[in-house]
């Protein structure tokens, strides 16, 4: 029996267990996916202990993604982002750390036929998700403009991402006029029917991904649909970060439709 899991605090409402277990069932894998809630001071013991116990793989979420980077051998993309959300314990050396949030966002866009190479992308938000998405989009060949409520954080992120520029939210209207891709990586829209993007700035030439997945239909996505834009909800990003982790851990193609169904039936 292979044991996988999620390290975070809190993890009570995570959708990862049903999504991964649906994949194990579909492929007939003898595996289980558990959730673990260590205290902040115990993260090193938790990762070392998981390795010692033979746990096959862990996802890592808030508040441990940055600390985990220091406790594993991170892939280059995870190092640049500064956070690890997937750990693979299968090798003989130190566990390998990945950031599949970045890849999840890219796959969500590509699966909806959104071109990225040479395109203009606007990322709203410069927290954990914003960092991952900005680096991912730049690696995919897009030119990235980061806009954040705290403008200095956008400048700091832009300084680290190739070809990127940093802005405050007031620049969004101007940035969006020429944009091909827009990603909301703020938490705005999660708790209230609110959006960080002026409705009038949206147009049919921009594809809009909202990282927020609860609710699935955010005000931003409603405004984007009204403007004739392509819309991609946050469950696609959540799905593909899980798909990527599954494929890293098992070396098998993930049953994407089954995982998508398991996820969406719970949202
Ligand atoms: P985080 O590190 O705490 O960053 C929060 C971001 O939201 C910051 O840029 C912050 O700006 C901005 N923000 C918060 N309140 C705001 C407001 N009232 N107006 C404007 N900007 C505001 O959080 P995170 O981990 O990046 O997560 C951000 C969102 O992405 C969450 O909704 C999370 O659920 C979602 N997410 C989704 C996936 C997925 O797979 N779909 C994966 C990861 C995250 P300041 O810098 O100014 O504070």
Image: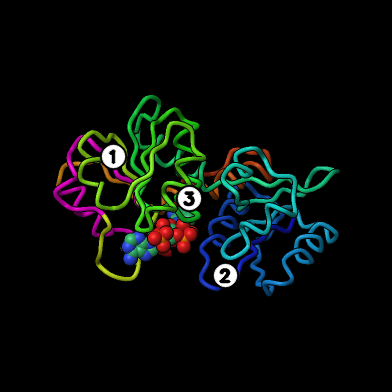
Q: Earlier in the sequence, mark 3 or mark 1?
A: 1
Q: Would you say 238 lies left or right of 58 here?
A: left
Residue denoted by label 2? 11
Closer to us: 234 or 193: 193
What residue do we see at 75% from left, 54% from top? 71
Q: Which residues are magenta?
A: 197-226
Q: Which mark is residue 207?
A: 1
What residue do we see at 66% from left, 65% from top? 34
Q: Is mark 3 within 8 Å of ligand 1?
A: yes
Neighbours of disc 3 within 10 Å: few (<14), some (14-19), many (20+): many
Closer to us: 58 or 172: 172
Residue denoted by label 3? 239
Residue 55 horizontal/vertical position (percent): 77, 57
Residue 39 horizontal/vertical position (percent): 68, 75
Neighbours of disc 1 within 10 Å: few (<14), some (14-19), many (20+): many
Closer to us: 103 or 260: 103
Q: Which mark is residue 62?
A: none
């Amino acid at each position: 029996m292979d044991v996988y899991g999620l390290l975070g605090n809190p993890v009570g409402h995570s959708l990862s267990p049903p999504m991964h277990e649906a994949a194990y069932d579909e492929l007939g894998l003898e595996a289980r996916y558990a959730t673990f809630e260590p205290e902040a001071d115990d993260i090193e013991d938790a990762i070392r202990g998981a390795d010692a116990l033979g746990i096959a793989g862990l996802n890592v979420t808030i508040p441990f993604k940055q600390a985990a980077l220091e406790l594993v051998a991170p892939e280059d993309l995870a190092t640049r982002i500064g956070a690890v959300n997937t750990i693979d314990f299968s090798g003989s050396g130190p566990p390998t750390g990945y950031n599949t949030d970045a890849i999840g966002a890219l796959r969500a866009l590509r699966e909806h036929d959104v071109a990225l190479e040479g395109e203009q992308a606007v990322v709203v938000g410069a927290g954990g998700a914003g960092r991952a998405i900005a680096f991912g989009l730049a690696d995919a060949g897009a030119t990235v403009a980061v806009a954040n409520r705290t403008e200095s954080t956008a400048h700091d992120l832009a300084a680290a991402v190739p070809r990127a520029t940093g802005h405050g939210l007031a620049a969004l209207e101007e940035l969006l006029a020429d944009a091909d891709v827009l990603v909301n990586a703020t938490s705005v829209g999660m708790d209230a029917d609110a959006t960080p993007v002026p409705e009038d700035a949206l147009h049919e030439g921009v594809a809009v991904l909202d990282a927020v997945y609860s609710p699935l239909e955010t005000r931003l996505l409603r405004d984007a649909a009204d403007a004739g834009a392509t819309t991609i909800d946050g469950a696609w990003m959540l799905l593909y970060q899980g798909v990527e982790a599954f494929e890293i851990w098992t070396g098998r193609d993930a049953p994407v439709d089954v995982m998508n169904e398991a996820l969406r039936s719970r949202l």
